[in-house]
Amino acid sequence: MDFDRHCREESVLVDVQEALLKGKKEEVEKLIDETLALGLPAARVLNEGLIVGMDRLGVLFKNGEVFIPEVLVAARAMNAGMARLEPLLVKEGIQPKGNIVIGTVKGDLHDIGKNLVAMMLKGAGYRIIDLGIDVSAEKFVAAATEGRADIVALSALLTTTMVQMRGIVEALRSNGLKIPVIIGGAPVTRAYADEIKAEGYAPDAASAVEEVGRLLKG
Amino acid sequence: MLRTQPVPSRKWEGCSKDNQSPQQAGGRMSCSMTPRELVKRSLELRSPVRVPRQLWLLPWAIDRHPKEVAEIQARFPDDIVTSPPFYKEALRTAGEEYAPGIFIDEWGCVFENRQRGIMGEVKEPLIRDWREWETVRVPRERLSVNTERVNDFCRTTDRFVLAKTSARPFEQLQFLRKPENLFLDLVDQPPELLRLLERIHSFYLEEMTLWAETEVDALVFSDDWGSQSSLLVSPSLWRRMFKPLYRDYIDVGHQYGKYVFMHSDGCIADILGDLVELGLDALNSQLFCMDIEELGRSYAGKLTFWGEIDRQYLLPFGTAAEVAAAVEKVHVCLYREGGVIAQCEFGVAAKPENVRAVFEAWEKIFLG
């Protein structure tokens, strides 16, 4: 009996990952309930189920094996699973891996890329403070201060709005905030990140998770 | 998104700016050859004396650089023009498409914009719930084209004429549902999605057929399928849901003896072979998001590359020398006695001198 239970404890976490990868929201919820019924700590379900699942999804996305629709349905399933876990995580005193302030820069209304990055980061265990679109440098500074941000993430789709990123980096620095900044968006390049002294750059949502991990370790 | 702007009709004069003889200009066409014939020769790989030209203008460029735009257009006249639709009934739109504020398109989709000269974004879906799908009104005013006036337009220009067709099923679905909702729908596949797509497609086919019956040279459709480095959706989903629609558009054009052009932004290398298989005649894509050498190896001579030169980096930030090198690369990789149109977009942040350099570089390649 104990052996069977142990086996199920291991396999149910893999099942959570698989259901997440397929974007099966109801199945994820059902499996999370099962993990809790088995007595698994919420932190373990999060780390070995949902986060590993999102991590696997990120690899598939980066390799061109899944695309935006599959990422979005997986994120939807992730959110459903998190809704089950969050009250328990609070009780267990589990903290997010870090606080990330994210937004699309002033003058730019495009948000699907930014939302994908936010979803992937949330799926990787970070707390996301999403400022939305058309966000001024002042708002980034205020949110980074109030939210005790560990990373500030900037998105822009347009060549004309990309240039706002420089001002945001400068505003953070001039306010004494040495928080690493990561940038991304269609026209953005590593060279541009270097030029404006942004510490991080990601060409896609999956890379953003890796880059944030690198920046926080560094 | 397709953003061509009609420009005033202008006759192409002579084989080169210096009015060289045909022999001096390459000896492959007579000076009486019209821009229309030049474009057709390019599409059919029949050794045009030079690549045809087309400059796409965003309103931003006209607002910011009116003098330079006029100078480039005068020096490098377009060989391709879009026919006005001469609608008998006005499209039911509201607001200005390229102005800050709200714009409502002819389907009722609401766009928000912050910057003059570019298009806005849909922030609230028209179809919030799939139960509302039947309330979507097809903009039948687009079928009120005055075909006699279109035909007059075609007869009085010697340039190659594109139809003002509006087919963009994927983008229109995004506008109606908001992109993120639509991406979820593509996985969930609610039956209403397919019914709506069928309705949209039937309308577009009707519009395509209407224009195919006029004297335009080519039909056009568009949909942005690429992100910076890959397709937005899986190739299998694209093949299952959207390729058949494009097959229909291309077939309508060909049945009426028209060429068919498509625009699609982003990295779309994974579906280029499909578009060739469908018989697409010309494709406008972001070549510089893809491996141009590989595109050349696989597809040069199989369809015409209707531009472009990198508008994300080179035109706004590059030098004229870098632009010229990019043009040379496109020429070497993709030109096969035709199969290339010197199109570029004078869009947001592009430097006028770099746009000019695109056409200067092409001119130098062909006319020395």
Image: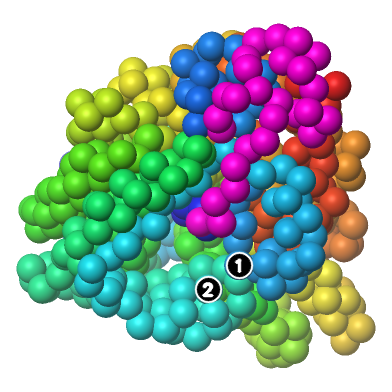
Residue A112 is situated, as x and y percent measured from the top left of the image, at: 48, 62
- Label 2: element kind: loop
Other-residue count near label 2 (Cα within 10 Å), few / some / many at <14 / 14–19 / ≥20: some
Residue at 34% x, 21% y: name it.
B279
Residue B86 is situated, as x and y percent measured from the top left of the image, at: 32, 62
Other-residue count near label 1 (Cα within 10 Å), few / some / many at <14 / 14–19 / ≥20: many
Q: Quadrant of the C terminus of chain B?
A: top right
Q: Tell me which corner region of the image, top left, top right, bottom left or bottom right, holds residue A84.
A: bottom left
Q: Main secondary structure of the magenta part?
A: loop
Q: How many marks?
A: 2
Report the side of A139 relative to B150 (left or right).
right
Q: Tell me which corner region of the image, top left, top right, bottom left or bottom right, holds residue B57.
A: bottom right
Residue occupied by mark 1: B59
Amino acid type at circle 1 is Pro
Which of these two is toward me, B178 or A132?
B178
Which of these two is toward me, B244 or A88?
B244
Residue occupied by mark 2: B98
Eyeballing the image, is B69 above or below A17? below
- Residues rendered magenta in the picture: B6-35
Residue at 79% x, 34% y: name it.
B17
Q: Is residue B251 visible?
A: no
Residue B126 in magenta stretch: no
Report the side of B198 relative to B14 (left or right).
left
Residue B360, numbered circle: none
Amino acid type at circle 2 is Tyr
Eyeballing the image, is B291 above or below B337? below
Residue B53 is situated, as x and y percent measured from the top left of the image, at: 63, 37
Report the side of B120 relative to B234 (left or right).
right
State how far apart marks 1 and 2 are (Cα): 7 Å
Residue at 40% x, 72% y: name it.
B122
Q: Are marks 1 and 2 in contact (CB under 8 Å)?
A: yes
Of mark 1 and mark 2, the one earlier in the sequence is 1
